[in-house]
Image: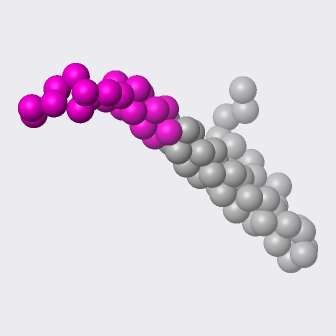
């Protein structure tokens, strides 16, 4: 495993021209967005699973407990 990755990235990008630095920045922003989207997608899926579980759990509730 490579140690001190941020420092290596800094050294490797130090002398890049601006157009390549922009590409590096674009890629970093893409990775952050991708990570955020995958987390949000997983949460959305979990919420849907919970909703389905609750719907199954309370199916026929009024028929089973008409006085409550």
Q: On screen, 27 above or below 17?
A: above
For this rendering, which residue is in front, 44 or 29? 44
Query: What color scheme is it?
Result: one colour
Asked if residue 19 lies left or right of residue 39, the reply is right
**Can residue 16 be seen in this snapshot?**
yes
Majority secondary structure of the magenta segment?
helix
Residue displayed at 63% across by 51% down: 37
Residue displayed at 9% across by 32% down: 67
Q: On screen, 43 above or below 26?
A: above
Quarter of the image holding residue 66?
top left
Q: Position of residue 15 (x, y in %)?
A: 86, 67
Q: Give the range drawn in magenta.
A: 47-68
Asked if residue 25 lies left or right of residue 64, the reply is right
Q: Quadrant for the C terminus, please.
A: top left
Q: On screen, 5 above or below 63?
A: below
Q: Position of residue 8 (x, y in %)?
A: 74, 48
Residue displayed at 90% across by 75% down: 19
Q: How many marks?
A: 0
Asked if residue 6 lies left or right of residue 23, the reply is left
Residue displayed at 82% across by 55% down: 12
For this rendering, which residue is in front, 36 or 14? 36
Q: Where is residue 48 in the image (x, y as percent from the top left)?
A: 50, 39
């Amino acid at each position: 495993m490579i140690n001190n990755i941020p420092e290596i990235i800094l050294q490797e990008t130090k002398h890049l021209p601006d157009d390549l630095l922009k590409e590096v920045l674009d890629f970093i922003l893409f990775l952050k967005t991708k990570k955020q989207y995958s987390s949000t997608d997983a949460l959305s899926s979990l919420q849907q699973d919970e909703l389905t579980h609750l719907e199954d759990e309370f199916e026929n509730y009024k028929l089973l407990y008409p006085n409550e």
